[in-house]
Image (cartoon, grey):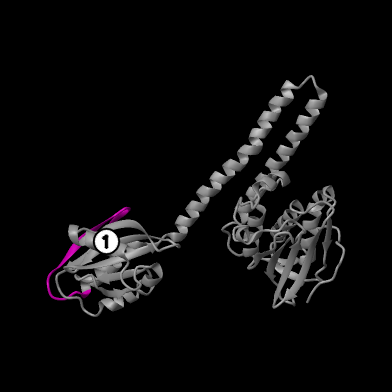
Amino acid sequence: MVQGWLVVAALAIGLLIGGGATTLLLVAARRGRVAAAVSAGALPSGIDAVLDVLEAPAILVDPSNRLVKASDAAKAAGLVGRGIEPVALEAVAEVRRTGMPLERDVTIGGDRHRHLHLSAALVGARHVLVLAEDRTESVRLAEMRRDFVANVSHELKTPIGAISLLAEAVESAAEDPEQVRRFAARLSSEASRLGELTQDIIALSRVQGAELVEAPEPVAVDSVIAAAIDRNRVAAEAKQIALAAAKSRGTMVLGHGPTLVTALQNLIRNAIQYSPEHSRVGIGVTRRDGRVEIAVTDQGPGISEEDQERIFERFFRSDPARSRETGGTGLGLAIAKHAAANHGGEVRVWSQLGHGSTFTISLPLAAATTTARPTAASAPAVPSEGVSE
């Protein structure tokens, strides 16, 4: 893309240059060769119009390293600010020194780095055209993929290693039925953990990086809540935790029912995991300003302000030791975040240490005239505690 713009810009600028003879300069590129016109004449004002039509970040630098012209996108990309970005000037100096065009990847900025791919070539006798392609997002995604693979590999090693060791233990204890039963129970637990992690990885891969849901359908919020609670009922009963839910009085949203159930299910599961036995998890519903908010409140230990900034990161655990005890995969909140974003919504958290936590999914309401057709999942009704308007 950048190489193509470099061809167009350099040729157009070369044609605008008057006076001396115009020659053709071949630009070496990674995937081909591009041409740039070179002339010794003075640069006419028409160059402004050429750079104005470029969508790519571009700057034209004169023989004194002064900025002649910058495209509208140049400032946003960081090529120019109070002055010309130093790495761009380094590229300009290299082009003048060798007389040959160049391409290089650079990183600019302070705390928030931007990754740019620069292409530079002579225009005229000593003027240099520099174009940039912002690759920050692609670099970030590549880093996320590497981190994700590394984290998944690490997380899978634990249950797989445990299953292997327990299988050997069962074999060695074949003559001791009590030991066999104990090891078998642990095998079942580790297998369940592995299955849960696998399902979460699949769920995250489906929602991460996706755009808004295509062809959304009307989804009843009551149906989403009922299905999410039903999937967590066994875990809640095991800890004797009461699940108290409000009814939304027919509130509808547009989206993909199963994905919304998965998002809310993960918030409820997280609340159960971090709540003490014989406590309560509440699911409340509020409608305001064209949105519906589903809040899941627990009576757990709470989350520090520092950890709240990272709580939605994949595999992040505020208390790794406690997470191993509760069996969490570290993916549930990330799944909820991406699922809500795919529906034009968000997930936020309120928490205080020692006072529990509240995770809230905020979603746009469906149009008031939309006819309901519940698509989440069939589930038993939940007790009503009212709904805030």
Q: Nearer the viewer, residue 75 or 378?
A: 75
Quarter-wise, where is residue 83 in the image? bottom left
Residue 214 visible (yes or no)? no
Badge count: 1
Instruction: Provide residue 165's location: percent of width, then percent of height.
Output: 67, 29
Q: Residue at point 59% right, 44% down?
A: 152
Q: Residue lying farthest left?
A: 20
Most common secondary structure along the magenta stretch: strand
Name the amino acid type tagged 1: Glu
Left or right: 256 with respect to 84? right
Question: Of all residues shown, which one is farthest toward the top?
Answer: 175
Residue range of the region highlighted in magenta in the rendering: 16-35
Residue identified by numbered label 1: 90
Q: Residue furthest front?
A: 354
Asked if residue 77 lies in the magenta stretch, the reply is no
Mark 1 Cα shell of 10 Å, populated few (<14), some (14-19), many (≥20): few
**Residue 191 position in % (x across, y down):** 71, 38
156 vs 205: above or below: above
Classify 201 as above or below 295.
Answer: above
The picture places residue 106, in percent across and down from the top left corner, at: 35, 58
- Residue found at x 52% / y 49%: 147
